[in-house]
């Protein structure tokens, strides 16, 4: 521990009073940094850090968007290049005292799109793991790739080799990079995801030498999950805490926290929380001043080491439940939370509000046990957020056994579709799709997502509200309704005062639109049409959109996609349950729909929570279980409908237990047998109408996500840039007034080589 002790001595006195530290820092003259952007309007920013030239791409559009879940990571903040310069200097105390060595593994929290710290520090260590929300990964990967030097690149040149793929070792002004160094970008949500040794991306290393967080502290609500994530990451190392006698056998994990001094209240809140579990030092000596991070700069860097007593307290259930080395303990804890549910309460007391922080369950055996032992209250409690924003009362939200059974009886009656009625239903769906296409003017792109949302909502009304007739003139109202449903669904996960006010206003708008379409509805009562429309619509629209894209627009082999389209056409000509299941060639239409539901489950996570005060919210990760290589093979993240025939012919049956797009056990969705047919009809209608040569698909922005390999993003706000466009057609194919070089996709001829 000598190196750690010398390192801490070099930092100066330990911070023991958070209030005093906040007073000292904010009593200084702090220069105005505004919000702290480098340049919030530029799409590219050129920087030089320790003699190395870098070009960083950022997204002002994303920053200014209303994206739920945050946008701050979309641009570079002023502290980041300053911190990157400081931490990669040879004179940095972390390097001088060999806290960070060529064998070190470092993780960064909230890295943002730039990757600057990784690009400058990674040549000096073994592995650098970058983590943040999924929305930043596209630009982050672009910046890592375009700024990755080749071995021949010197520190003082801006080489064209930046555009080469991957990260290779490089010679820099600070040190020669080891040949084994690597940068790994991962998603990590502080509030929901589980910290485990797998984050090191190593077979030999199970913990980190340092945790870095640069300008992540600006929101009071994120302080507890950020600190808890730091605790969990530090605990991966057995000697994660530091004692006065230096008795630990190895170096503990260090937390390095850099931030801009904005709000004294937020800073003090963070430091009080952090100091409860960590011993804290402020970096004041050495090159910190010259790098622009010292006294009176408006920026500050603190070092934290987990306290020894913190190893036996404040242990989060999410860490216990999913820790690989404590499988039996995690199972018992999770089950205890479920089986203690109160089964007789009709309404929930105010104090039993659903917690936003939850434990993610990715073990199939544990997930199955939780779902099998579920009760009405344990299912309904996490869904009370939907009651608040939609005023719904249905099988998902009630604790009344009698009402639950009556609702299911009504739902099954509405779902019942005799085989002789199937062709009529298919024709009605096709008419809805044709109606949608006729309203799209030539050469004017229309957003694909909203078009499919409106289609699925109209179908839900057709099927489940048969007494209501919607005319084409109702489309603007339905479009507004679907937008409000999406916005309220996302906002329902927030419980702050600003969101509550916005939710109230949007909920009022939603019921106003519903009352115009459903005059008989009495609003937020049992007569609310959303009671049945929300489950039906939410089951359909995302999987219909992605199934349509997989069949018509992804770069699968042309022979394969041609076969899929033939299967859809055969079903359109003979709409029967037998035709739906008939497996000619590689797969059946049922296989195509089942594969879509596997890869893109309508319910990505199934939540359960006991009514008991303080009970943990459990989230069965359906999307993970339906993609994991352990169950589905190495191609588990690929769209492969032919896998179903192989699975059924094989001896293993685990896949049957893992496939749960309609839930499991006692609360399995009554639409289990009917919904796949409905999805097939909707996708078949879309492919029939829009799959010809007169339609192309465009994507706004740089992503071209639907052309990339791997699964499509299954998030609510994903694929928003996709546009359908009707074009002129001549004998040679599609022609239109596109600017030369524009990338579009012909929905008829978009496939790879067979």
Image (cartoon, helix red, strand yellow):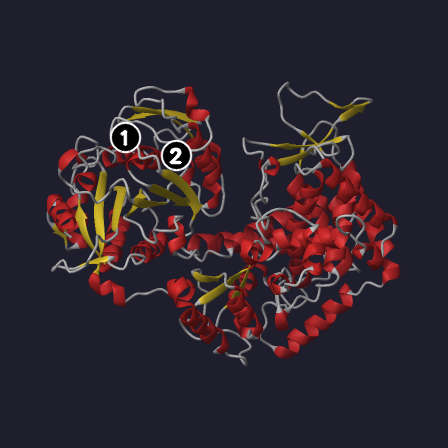
Residue 114 tag number: 2
Q: Classify residue 126 as left or right of residue 3.
A: right
Residue at point 60% right, 52% down? 485
- Are the two marked residues, 1 and 2, in contact with CB atoms closer than 8 angstroms? no
Q: Is residue 153 above or below residue 377?
A: above
Q: Position of residue 366 (x, y in %)?
A: 51, 68
Does the image show residue 106?
Answer: yes
Residue at point 70% right, 60% down? 648
Q: Is residue 214 above or below residue 500?
A: above
**Which quadrant of the view contains residue 99?**
top left
Q: Is residue 609 above or below residue 650?
A: below
In front: label 1 or label 2? 1
- Of the two numbered discs 1 and 2 on the same chain, state the one appearing first in sequence: 2
In the rendered image, the quadrant that contains the C terminus is top right
Per the image, label 1 sits on a secondary structure element best described as loop
Q: Position of residue 312 (x, y in %)?
A: 26, 67
Residue 322 tag number: none
Q: Classify residue 365 as left or right of residue 110.
A: right
**Which quadrant of the view contains residue 566?**
top right
Q: Which residue is mark 1?
A: 176
């Amino acid at each position: 521990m000598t190196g750690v002790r010398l390192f801490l001595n070099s930092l100066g006195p330990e911070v023991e009073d958070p209030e005093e530290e906040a007073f000292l820092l904010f009593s200084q003259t702090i220069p105005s940094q505004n919000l702290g952007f480098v340049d919030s309007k530029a799409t590219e920013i050129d920087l030089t850090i320790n003699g190395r030239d870098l070009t960083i791409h950022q997204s002002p559009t994303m920053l200014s968007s209303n994206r739920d879940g945050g946008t701050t990571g979309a641009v570079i903040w002023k502290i980041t290049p300053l911190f990157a310069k400081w931490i990669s200097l040879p004179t940095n105390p972390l390097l001088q005292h060999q806290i960070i060595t060529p064998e070190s593994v470092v993780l960064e929290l909230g890295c943002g799109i730039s990757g600057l710290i990784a690009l400058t520090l990674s040549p000096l260590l073994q592995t650098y793991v970058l983590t943040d929300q999924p929305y930043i990964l596209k630009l982050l990967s672009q910046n890592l790739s375009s700024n990755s030097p080749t071995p021949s690149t010197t520190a003082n040149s801006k080489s064209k080799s930046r555009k080469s793929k991957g990260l290779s070792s490089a010679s820099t002004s600070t040190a020669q990079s080891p040949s084994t160094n690597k940068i790994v970008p991962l998603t990590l949500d502080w509030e929901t995801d589980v910290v485990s040794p797998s984050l090191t991306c190593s077979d030999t290393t199970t913990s980190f030498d340092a945790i870095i967080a640069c300008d992540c502290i600006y929101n009071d609500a994120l302080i507890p999950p950020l600190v808890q994530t730091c605790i969990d990451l530090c605990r991966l190392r057995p000697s994660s805490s530091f004692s006065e006698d230096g008795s630990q056998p190895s170096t503990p994990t260090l937390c390095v926290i850099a931030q801009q001094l904005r709000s004294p209240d937020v800073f003090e809140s963070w430091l009080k929380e952090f100091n409860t579990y960590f011993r804290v030092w402020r970096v004041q000596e050495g090159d910190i001043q010259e790098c622009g991070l010292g006294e009176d700069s408006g920026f500050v860097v603190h070092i934290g080491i987990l306290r020894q007593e913190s190893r036996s307290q404040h242990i989060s259930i999410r860490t216990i439940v999913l820790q690989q080395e404590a499988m039996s303990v995690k199972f018992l804890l999770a089950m205890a939370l479920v089986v203690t549910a109160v089964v007789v309460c009709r309404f929930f007391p105010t104090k039993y509000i659903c917690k936003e922080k939850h434990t993610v369950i990715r073990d199939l055996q544990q997930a199955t046990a939780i779902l099998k032992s579920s009760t009405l209250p344990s299912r309904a409690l996490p869904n009370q957020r939907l009651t608040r924003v939609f005023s719904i009362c249905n099988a998902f939200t009630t604790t009344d056994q009698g009402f639950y059974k009556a609702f299911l009886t009504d739902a099954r009656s509405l779902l019942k579709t005799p085989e002789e009625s199937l062709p009529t239903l298919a024709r009605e769906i096709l008419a809805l799709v044709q109606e949608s296409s006729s309203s799209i003017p030539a050469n004017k792109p229309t957003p694909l997502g909203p078009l499919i949302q409106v289609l699925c909502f109209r179908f839900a009304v057709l099927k489940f509200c048969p007494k209501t007739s919607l005319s084409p003139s109702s489309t603007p109202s339905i479009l507004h309704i679907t937008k409000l449903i999406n916005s309220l669904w996302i906002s329902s996960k927030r419980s702050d005062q600003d969101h509550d006010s916005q939710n109230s206003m949007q909920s009022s708008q939603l019921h106003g639109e519903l009352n115009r379409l459903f005059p008989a509805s009495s609003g937020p009562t049992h007569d609310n049409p959303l009671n049945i429309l929300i489950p039906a619509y939410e089951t359909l629209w995302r999987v219909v959109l992605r199934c349509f894209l997989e069949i018509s627009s992804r770069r699968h082999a042309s022979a394969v996609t041609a076969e899929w389209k033939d299967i859809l056409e055969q079903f359109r000509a003979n709409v029967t349950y037998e035709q739906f299941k008939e497996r000619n060639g590689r797969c059946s239409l049922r296989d195509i729909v089942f594969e879509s539901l596997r890869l893109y489950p309508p319910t990505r996570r199934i939540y359960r929570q006991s009514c008991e005060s303080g009970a943990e919210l459990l989230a069965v990760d359906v999307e993970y279980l339906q993609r994991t290589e352990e169950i589905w093979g190495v191609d588990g993240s690929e769209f492969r409908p032919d896998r179903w025939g192989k699975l059924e012919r094989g001896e293993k049956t685990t896949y049957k237990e893992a496939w749960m797009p309609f839930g499991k056990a006692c609360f399995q969705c009554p639409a289990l047998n009917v919904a796949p047919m409905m999805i097939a009809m909707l996708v078949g209608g879309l492919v029939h109408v829009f799959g010809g040569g007169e339609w192309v698909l465009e994507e706004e922005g740089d992503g071209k996500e639907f052309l990339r390999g791997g699964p499509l993003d299954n998030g609510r706000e994903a694929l928003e840039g996709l546009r359908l466009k009707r074009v002129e057609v001549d004998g040679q194919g599609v022609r239109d007034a596109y600017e030369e070089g524009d990338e579009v996709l012909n929905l008829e001829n978009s496939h790879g080589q067979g």
